[in-house]
Image: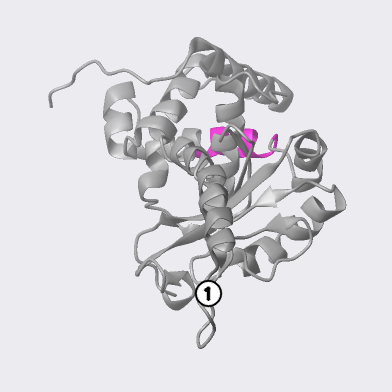
Amino acid sequence: MLSYPATIPLSSRTLNHLAERIRSHRKQRRSRWRRLEPGRQALLALAHLRNGDTYTRLAAGFAIGVATAWRYVQEAIALLSSAADDLETAVRRIRLLAYAILDGTLIPIDRVAEQKPYYSGKHKRHGVNVQVIADAAGRLVWASPALPGSAHDLTAARSHGIIDALTSADVMTFADKGYQGAHGSVRTPFKRRRFRPKLSRRQKAVNRTHAKIRARGERAIATLKTWKLLVKLRCCPRRATAIVQAILVLHHVETNRYAG
């Protein structure tokens, strides 16, 4: 088997953060000898999350078994996801923003036995629905737990309590037409209804301005998907929430924002 050196586009700060969490976890559990030291386990987990390397490739590269590689990655994900902020904590920061941008994205998944709940009619593929909140500059602030892909964006936002939380915090939020009817502090573009007059010139101008603002939210989704594992999840969709939350923590550590 051939091997080659590779890079992970992350800073040493992120590696050290995860390694320290793993080291503390081992010390707390009084863990016995492991095949990989905390720093090497952290590197393995980051290679999986950021570069999307498979367990087979990681096992070969780190000279461990495939089952051991899986176990190490799952342990790292669990440690990171447990440190992720919930919506209430995130809203304390969001209320300080000039405004927020709310959008939803579909993270594709492999076929599953129970396919119907995970099939998105909008995207014509299986996946999980994740709601993303960005700031005025399009930077990722918070990502929700994953719901089956068949969930509508507005339904998902209401299920997570996002609409109520943003309204209670009195944060003006820009969202697309999929959130029509959200009310509260959520602002959506004008939508032409069937059998009704066309949009006025003023309404079209408002929609153009709204689109320019909302487009910044796409940056947050793009940032989330720079973690190659989220290009297509090849695991049980029930693990999607922990993976997204772990990546959110790592992203904030990497950008040195909201790092706990």
Taking the image as drawn, is residue 182 in sight? yes
The range drawn in magenta is 74-83
Q: Position of residue 5 (x, y in %)?
A: 24, 15
Farthest bottom residue in view: 195
User: Which image quarter: residue 91?
Assistant: top right
259 with respect to 8 (left or right)? right
Q: Is residue 223 above or below residue 165?
A: above
Please tell me how many numbered marks the rendered image carries: 1
Q: Is residue 184 left or right of residue 201?
A: right
**Residue 117 vertical position relative to residue 239 in the rendered view, above or below:** below
The residue under label 1 is 192
Main SS of residues in magenta: helix
117 above or below 81?
A: below
- Residue 205 belongs to magenta span: no
Residue placed at 69% from the left, 38% from the top? Answer: 82
Q: Residue at x 81, y 39 (%)?
A: 95
Residue 222 shown left or right of residue 76 in the figure: left
Type of the residue with mark 1: Arg
Of 88 and 246, nearer the camera is 88
Q: Is residue 32 visible?
A: no
x then y, percent, for residue 126: 39, 66
